Image (cartoon, helix red, strand yellow):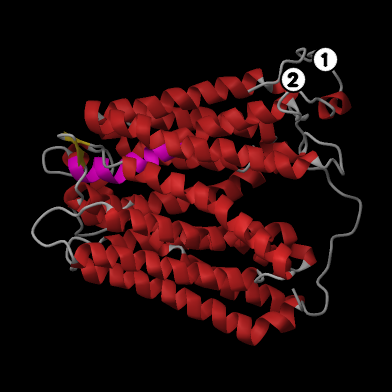
Amino acid sequence: MTAPEATPNLDFPEEAARDDRAFLGHPKGLGLLGLVEGCERFSYYSMQTLLTLYMVRYLLVPGRQEGVIGLDWVTTHLFPGLSGQPLASEIFGLYTALVYLTPILGGILADLLLGRRAALIAGGVVMSLGHFLMAFESAFLLALISLVMGVGLFKGNIASQVGELYKQGDIRRAMAFQIFYIFINVSVIVAPLISGTLGEKVGWHWGFGCAGVVMVLGLLLYIYAKPWLPADSKAAKSAEPRATFEKGDGPRLLAVLVLVPIMGVSLLTNQQIFNAYLVWADQQFQLSFMGETLPTSWMITIDATLSFSMLVAVAAFWAFVGKRTGKEPDELGKMILGCAFIVGGAACLYMAAATQGTGKIGLFWPVMFHLVNSIGFAHLLPVSLALFTRLAPRALNASIVGIYYLAFFGANLAVGKIGTLFSTMPTTTFWLLHMASAAVALIGFGLFKLLFAKRLMGTP
């Protein structure tokens, strides 16, 4: 909420804007950007939560899928011979993979041609169009293309504005990104409760329509927020010479490229939550309460709530350990621990499948999975980008962020392909495969730490 202070003059200069403390002691623009990003994340996670369930339960069935424009081409050229849940898994994997690739292109387009503000507004418009196209079954693939393009233009061009709200050296800047992240997490928690419930209980198009309405509200809010945001600017040509490679940069770049596939493998179990895991939950979990069947999408709210809680808890734990002992694991050490917890999380899913019997699966093992996996992810995600940027050659420091997200691109492609096995493979074997993937990543990070870390990174 905005603190009770006077509304700033709409014509104030940029420096005055940076001294603004109208939102919890921070610039009003932070609160507005947080709300805009919250709307975008609400719409995105509404879509991601409903997508696989919608395809498996409703769209990709005989009598409906024939009317989807372009689907015949997809099943002939991209995913030949697939139908039903395996086809849904491949489409999900390709869609979510491209969502991590297009922001790189969106950032380049904003820098070189459109400018950040125009790119973001265009992205919001295209995303909104994509959500509303989901109301038409025949336009399903067109909707996915629109959403991918919209996210690409939007996502990479909003977080960069947060830091620009502050003068250089302003100590509030670090806290600003934490507040911004809270907006995102609240949206991820709430989206399945609202859009998921509407989609599953009222009608699929109601859920997608809700996501579209919220995206439009976010877009309008961004347009309204212009007076409180940093001035838009295109990348300026620098007169200074470009940074050149230094001695030792080659091995550092090679190390980053080696870590990308290891990172991708470590993400497989977590990224599968929105795909085959949700289908399994929908078919086999005991989701009734007082005679009422709960929406399967609420499992995503459980995961999001525990993920946010464990991020806070793990950070507090290592801060406590560091204060008491004066040391804590370095980035690779925490990532290895994270992979161990992810193995444990996948083991919980194995136990759920192995102990099912003839009835439905109770929620003990699934909730334990979300808890243990969230602890693992809290060790993996926050520090992995820090590791990549620490290894990065100075000449390529900015580009390393794009390279880092290639791990998510590859992971989601793999999730789609591995998810095709869910319908034909025993469920216990399916989750053993995910345990093995996390174990492989653990070994990969361990070998990298043992053989290369000290030489490339020095003492932490």
Q: Tell me which segment is drawn in magenta.
A: 44-57
Residue type at mark 2?
Pro
Please give the residue where the numbered disc 1 appears in the rendered image: 11
**As drawn, 373 above or below 184:** below
Please name whichever residue, 44 or 28, is drawn nearer the observer in this view of the structure.
28
Position of the N terminus, as image quadrant, is top right
x, y percentage for residue 243?
84, 63
Element type at marker 1? loop
Whole-Å distance between the Cαs marked 2 and 1?
A: 7 Å
Quarter assignment of residue 453: bottom right
Badge 1: residue crowd in 10 Å (few <14, some 14–19, many ≥20)? few
Please give the residue where the numbered disc 2 appears in the rendered image: 227
Residue type at mark 1?
Asp
The residue positioned 66% from the left and 60% from the top of the image is 320
Residue 55 counted in the magenta span: yes
Q: Are marks 2 and 1 in contact (CB under 8 Å)?
A: yes
Please name whichever residue, 389 or 323, is drawn nearer the observer in this view of the structure.
323
